[in-house]
Image (cartoon, grey):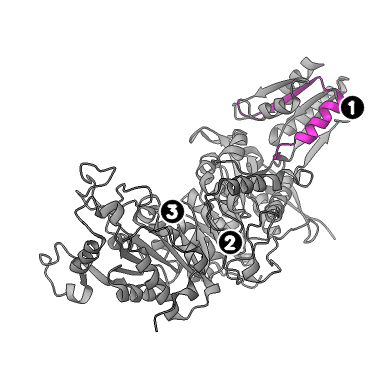
């Protein structure tokens, strides 16, 4: 029997706003299966987002949901989590949301190691506003604000998260649906700040003007370019030159922020 | 029982007032001259089971208090002009989404980084219009260390009762000065909590019922699984592009404040019964204004003071009543800026009397003698 996603969806709020060929719907399914696999109570889950196409996702899922201001999802989520650490808190946003306007919140949440899962939907472009370049747009790629090609260097979201102190960092893609589910599930289980970069496709904003004639060709690009970590570890840097690595790329155990805070300050509980 | 009297700094009194009101979360960012509020909360919150966090910036601090409030906590942040500018984005979010939070703005000289250690009253209009779009705001204006405490309690009460962000608009003098403070016994001051139980099953709960001024607000985790968005939304809380709903909801959130004017707007009237000359002043200048009024009375001049403890919504009704009942000849409006409240006083006066602003950017309170001089011109 087909998997029943409807238990986790606000079915009356569908259809979603995403364009034909957009991969966010695929990731939404992996996201739901990951949560279902953990057996968590829907009442305990908070999903916060910023502004952008993927930030509309919270509206479609039947949890406590918070659609905030541009880039601010992690800052709102931090307040939620500190006020009630029993809640399972997920903050999501796009590449522009998380690494441009919300970059400060992103790096400091990583540094604090607060127990929040951050999902970065990276489609290399500002989709909702109509294809402007983001901090992850590849150098040379076309965007409406880079009509001669992207002149800036770009961020590697995974390295940014590791450098800032996140204790669980993974990368996956919308093409690798079961892998995506697994990465999200492991991130949710991790105690501390976990980041999953999910490579997505925006055929409307990015693909059409960057030599991806069809949405399918963008998914096939993910299939061709993604290398599982175990395999990548056996490959030379030359072999990996035009590839990207997927899997759990960093994991360490460090005291979680709220637990550290409570023990450091001798929090008087039950007041 | 002996009263609990302490010699305390104004900023610390804000922190103690917040704790008295039940605040259990503080998200902040250091800025002069408000930092002592954060410092006091960092020390005091864990003692009462609350948590403090110094966020990475002012925007994040404002976001964190909204998040904490959604999780059910009473939450406070404090700042000064430059930080208040940064908080405006999420202050608008709290207005539209009807999230109770309290923001303290210890006013200093602006614009920009301005005069970090000098007092000012130049954020009066920012408090009202700082964020974009038509929106409600409540702002209270303490003038003493005791009022820093009491008005912070009232700010939390108003935030909880009306599901609206409330600004404690104070200044560097009131925040930094020390005076004796009587800390009320528990129960002595009223403490209001938001209605958390909608009284209906989750499937029937409407977080933004347009027919009601105030809707119950169950905390995240209580089983109601509602949606909160900074987009204009319908009664279920989900985005809408309907201009009729947009209009209806905007008017509703503003009117829920305006129609409760009598409960929200608090003023002190000092010798206003028979006054024919009025001084209209807030905060530290109101203290000078009182001295000026007393001196004027000694000289046989019928001066009075109208001192708003709520500046937003503006005390239109109180001011209007005095102007029409007393046949006021003139109103003196001393303020530590180049004229913000004066414009509002002129609006209410509607040409019925003269209105004269007395402005200063000298980083000192306006002197009683300066106010008296203006009063005498109307006498």
| Label disc, if present, on residue A51 of the rendered structure | 3
Q: Nearer the viewer, residue A267 or A79?
A: A79
Residue A244's disc number: none
* Cα distance between the residues tagged 2 and 1: 48 Å
Pinpoint residue A238: horizontal percent, then vertical percent: 10, 64
Q: Viewer-nearest of labels 2 and 1? A: 2
Q: Residues within 10 Å of mark 3 (few under 14, many from 20)?
A: many
Q: Residue at x 85, y 61 (%)?
A: B1
The secondary structure type at the circle numbered 1 is: loop
- Chain bearing tag 1 is B
**Viewer-side residue, A169 vs B19:** A169
- Where B243 sits versus B223, above or below? above
Residue B194: image quadrant is bottom right
Can residue B46 be seen in this snapshot? yes
The vertical placement of B235 against B284, above or below, is below
Could you tell me residue B69's position as x and y percent? Answer: 60, 60
**Relative depth, front residue between A223 and A68:** A223
Label 1 belongs to which residue?
B274
Tell me the CA gap for discs 3 and 1.
Answer: 57 Å
Q: Which mark is residue B70?
A: 2
Residue that appears at 82% across and 35% down: B269
- Dot 1, how many residues are within 10 Å of its Cα: few (below 14), some (14-19), or many (20+)? some
Q: Label 3 marks which chain's residue?
A: A
Q: What's the magenta region?
A: B311-338
């Amino acid at each position: 029997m087909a998997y029943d996603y409807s238990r986790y969806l606000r079915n009356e709020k569908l259809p979603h706003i995403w364009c034909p060929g957009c991969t966010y719907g695929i990731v939404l399914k992996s996201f739901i299966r990951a949560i279902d696999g953990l057996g968590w109570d829907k009442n305990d889950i908070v999903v916060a987002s910023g502004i952008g196409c993927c930030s509309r996702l919270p509206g479609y899922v039947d949890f406590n949901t918070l659609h905030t201001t541009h880039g601010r999802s992690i800052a709102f989520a931090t307040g939620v989590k500190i006020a009630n650490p029993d809640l399972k808190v997920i903050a999501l946003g796009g590449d522009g949301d998380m690494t441009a306007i919300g970059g400060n919140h992103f790096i400091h949440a990583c540094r604090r190691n607060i127990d929040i899962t951050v999902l970065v939907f990276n489609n290399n472009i500002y989709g909702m506003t109509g294809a402007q370049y983001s901090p992850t747009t590849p150098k040379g790629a076309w965007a409406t604000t880079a009509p001669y090609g992207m002149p800036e260097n770009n961020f590697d979201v995974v390295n940014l998260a590791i450098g800032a102190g996140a204790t669980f960092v993974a990368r996956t893609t919308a093409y690798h649906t079961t892998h995506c589910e697994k990465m999200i599930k492991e991130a949710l289980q991790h105690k501390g700040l976990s980041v999953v970069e999910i490579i997505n496709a925006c055929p409307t904003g990015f693909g059409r003007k960057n030599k991806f004639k069809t949405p399918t060709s963008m998914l096939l690009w993910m299939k061709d370019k993604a290398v599982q970590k175990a395999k990548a570890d056996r490959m030379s840097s030359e072999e990996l030159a035009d590839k990207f690595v997927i899997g759990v790329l960093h994991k360490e155990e460090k005291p979680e922020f709220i637990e550290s805070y409570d023990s450091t300050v001798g929090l008087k509980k039950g007041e | 029982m002996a009263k609990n009297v302490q010699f305390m700094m104004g900023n610390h009194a804000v922190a103690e007032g917040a704790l008295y009101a039940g605040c259990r979360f503080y998200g902040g960012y250091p800025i002069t001259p408000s930092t002592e509020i954060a410092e006091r909360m960092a020390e005091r919150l864990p003692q009462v089971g609350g948590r403090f966090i110094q966020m990475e910036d002012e925007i994040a601090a404002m976001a964190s208090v909204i998040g904490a409030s959604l999780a059910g906590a009473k939450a406070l942040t404090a700042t000064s002009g430059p930080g208040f500018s940064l908080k405006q984005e999420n202050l608008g979010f709290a207005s539209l989404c009807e999230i109770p939070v309290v923001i303290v703005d210890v006013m200093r000289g602006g614009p920009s980084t301005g005069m970090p250690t000098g007092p000012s009253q130049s954020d009066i209009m920012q408090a009202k219009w700082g964020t974009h779009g038509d929106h409600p705001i409540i702002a209270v204006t303490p003038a003493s260390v005791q009022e820093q405490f009491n008005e912070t309690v009232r700010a939390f009460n108003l935030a909880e009762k009306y599901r609206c962000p409330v600004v404690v608009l104070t200044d560097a003098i009131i925040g930094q000065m020390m005076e004796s403070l009587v800390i009320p016994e528990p129960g002595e001051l009223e403490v209001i909590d938001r209605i958390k139980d909608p009284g209906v099953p989750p499937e029937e709960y409407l977080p933004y019922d347009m027919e009601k001024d105030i809707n119950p607000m169950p905390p995240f985790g209580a089983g109601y699984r509602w949606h909160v968005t900074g987009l204009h939304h319908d009664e279920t809380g989900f985005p809408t592009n309907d201009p009729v709903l947009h209009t209806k909801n905007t008017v509703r959130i503003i009117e829920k404040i305006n129609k409760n004017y009598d409960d929200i707007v608090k003023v002190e009237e000092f010798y206003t019964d028979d006054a024919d000359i009025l001084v209209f002043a807030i905060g530290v200048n109101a203290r000078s204004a009182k001295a000026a009024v007393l001196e004027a009375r000694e000289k046989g001049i019928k001066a009075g003071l109208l001192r708003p403890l709520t500046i937003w919504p503006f005390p239109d009704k109180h001011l209007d009543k005095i102007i029409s009942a007393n046949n006021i000849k003139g109103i003196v409006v001393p303020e530590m800026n180049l004229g913000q409240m004066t414009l509002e006083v002129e609006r209410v006066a509607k040409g019925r009397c003269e209105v004269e602003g007395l402005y200063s950017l000298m980083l000192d309170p306006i002197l009683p003698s300066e106010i008296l001089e203006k009063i005498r011109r109307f006498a």
